[in-house]
Amino acid sequence: MHEIAQALLIHYSSRRPRRIVTVSGRGVRGKFPSRKSADPAQFESLVEEMALRFLEAAPLVKSLATQPQVFEYTDGTRQRRYTPDVEIQIKTAEATVFLEVKDDRTFTLDSEAAARLRAALPHLRQRGHRFHIVFRSDLLANDLQRRLALLLRMRPPRGRYRPDIDTSLWDPENGTPPPADIQQQWEDAKRQCDDLLRRIMKRDPDDLLSPSTR
């Protein structure tokens, strides 16, 4: 207990984002019990689950939604679609940010995934959307995931979704405090998550997707 997301047309599509399927042998899929999401927050890999842990603890994040919407745009003569992994609302700026979560052990700049992101970026910016990439290495730095997993297991379970609660509190529904040492660990983890989010949002995704800089 003591260790504890060519200037052409882009628009919101009426197409529903693809649905999460049942667990298969190809990967880890599940639902994350987020107090910041009106609908069940869903993940399709361990790195997406890690990203949800960090976003849940970061006080800067007011709300989140997984696979929030499908963007459709024209790229030359080709019609493309792009669905961000996560959409977050930032408290201090009242801003919406889209996040793409990638495992940098396997993500390559010559992959179809990288090409899709490079094609989507100009069109998202044309609409005024902020977009950032979160890597697995970001989420594992400084033993963050182990400590978050332990703390979130100890934290009282969430009740019915309520947009009016302070999700940064240990037990926002009931106001029950944890022991003093756990409260300190929770405060330290929240600060680390906010610092990580600020660093991620300072990075230019073009730099991360350019072969000359990685």
Image (spheres, rainbow, N blue to C red):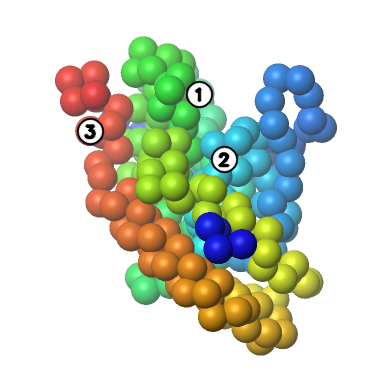
- Judge whether residue 29 can be spotted in this image: yes
* Relative side of 197 to 213, left or right: right
State the separation of the CA atoms marked 2 and 3: 22 Å
Q: What element carries label 1?
A: strand
Q: Which residue is drawn at 53% across and 57% down?
A: 3
Inspect the image, locate mark 1, and give the three-letter code of the amino acid beneath it. Answer: Gln
Instruction: In the rendered structure, find residue 207 and report the number of the disc placed on it.
Output: 3
Q: How many labels does the image show?
A: 3
* Relative side of 8 to 48, left or right: left
> Residue 41 appears at what percent x and percent y?
67, 52
Q: What element carries label 2?
A: helix
Which residue matches tag 1?
A: 79
Q: Is 151 placed above or below 115 here?
A: below
Task: Say which quadrant the N terminus sits in.
Answer: bottom right
Inspect the image, locate mark 2, and give the three-letter code of the amino acid beneath it. Answer: Glu
**Most foreground residue, 87 or 157:** 157
State the separation of the CA atoms marked 3 and 1: 25 Å
- In this view, the mark in front (2 or 1): 2
Task: Say which quadrant the C terminus sits in.
Answer: top left
Q: Badge 1: how crowded within 10 Å, few (<14), some, or many (20+)?
A: few
- Which tag, 2 or 1, sits closer to the chain's start? 2
Instruction: In the rendered structure, find residue 48 and report the number of the disc placed on it.
Output: 2
